[in-house]
Image (tube, rainbow, N blue to C red):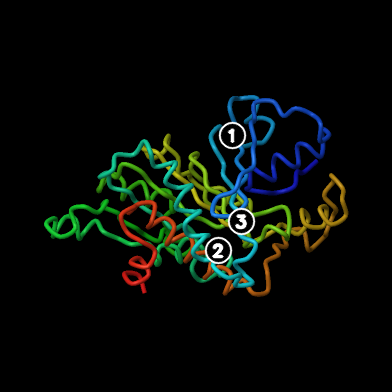
Amino acid sequence: MRMRRTDLALEARELWQERAGAASALPGVEAHDSLREGIPVSTVKVLNARGEEALGKPRGSYVTLTLEGLASREEGIFQRAVRAVAGEVSALLEDIPAGGLVLVAGLGNRAITPDAVGPKVHQNVLVTRHLVRQMPEHFGALRPVASLAAEVMGTTGVESGELVRAVCEKIKPACVVAVDALASRSLKRLCKTVQISDTGITPGSGVGNHRMGLTQDTLGMPVIALGVPTVVDGATLAADLLGTDELPRLGEGGDLLVTPKDIDSQVNDLAKVIGYGLSMALQPGISLEELELLLS
């Protein structure tokens, strides 16, 4: 039986519990909920091989922030969301040297809005590597940060993973932060959640288009992954709405992907939140107000 498609560890855990029963203990997995800046945060930790098998996710930490008020422009939500993203990313950067170069890789296709999260985040990241190198007397206190938009193979002829690896071999960063669009099992999480993990990412996996993974094994350095679910598989959505475990046969609609009608504005908003949050985590001495001046 084909499984429902999701990139979110939180949803993979929910699906396991739905099949096994809510009271069943999930082997090799720990989970807890908390708040950061008033924003709900769900943390799922895959601890061992049993957890990997149960969730279909590599071992590591997966943090999901729920940004319900962003689309409705709730007062103060942008600032709180940026600080929440910055706080969660900062926790994953603790083992990276303070002055170590970080490469931000925005994955995806800027010409297709649901897949443009990565390239748009790339546009909202404070890039400092050239400043630190050329004018250390003025910018030496900043962490060197480089960024690139690693477009899809259909437009470049080069896998995004190959491109990122080639850049890593040249500039030798201490860490890579990869940003990509994801797939969800449910409409309620589309463009309303941000998943942050320390396990890396496989571009295109959410839509069944697996490419070279960006992980510590493939790049030789830690990889932090940030993702936003922007699409839900048609069969997965139908099963979710019908409350059934078995995916219905949709005929010609079997490859359908569903996305919100206001995807343009939602992707723009989320890309700014993630880009600013990343920049604040990488440059803790810069305030949000200063960051808005530098990036506007």
Mark 1 or 2: the one toward you: 1
Question: Residue 288, position in %: x, y?
Answer: 39, 63
Q: Is residue 262 above or below residue 46?
A: below
Residue 115 visible, this angle: yes
Mark 3 or 2: the one toward you: 3
Mark 1: secondary structure = strand
Q: Looking at the figure, which quarter contains the C terminus?
A: bottom left
Mark 3: secondary structure = strand
Q: Cβ–Cβ below 8 Å for labels 1 and 2? A: no
Question: Residue 56's quadrant in the figure?
Answer: top right
Q: Earlier in the sequence, mark 1 or mark 3?
A: 1
The answer to whether 86 appears left or right of 112 in the picture is left
Mark 2: secondary structure = helix
Question: Residue 63's quadrant in the figure?
Answer: top right
Q: Is residue 246 above or below residue 107?
A: above
Report the front residue among 128 and 222.
128
Question: Residue 102, position in %: x, y?
Answer: 32, 48
Q: Is residue 17 above or below residue 163?
A: above
| Callout 2 amino acid | Asp
Q: Earlier in the sequence, mark 3 or mark 2?
A: 2
Q: Residue at x 44, y 42 (%)?
A: 91
Q: Estimate the spatial distance between the alpha carbons at disc 1 and disc 2, rounded to whole Å.
A: 27 Å
> Which residue matches tag 3?
193
Question: Residue 178, position in %: x, y?
Answer: 44, 51
> Which residue matches tag 2?
115
Label for residue 230?
none
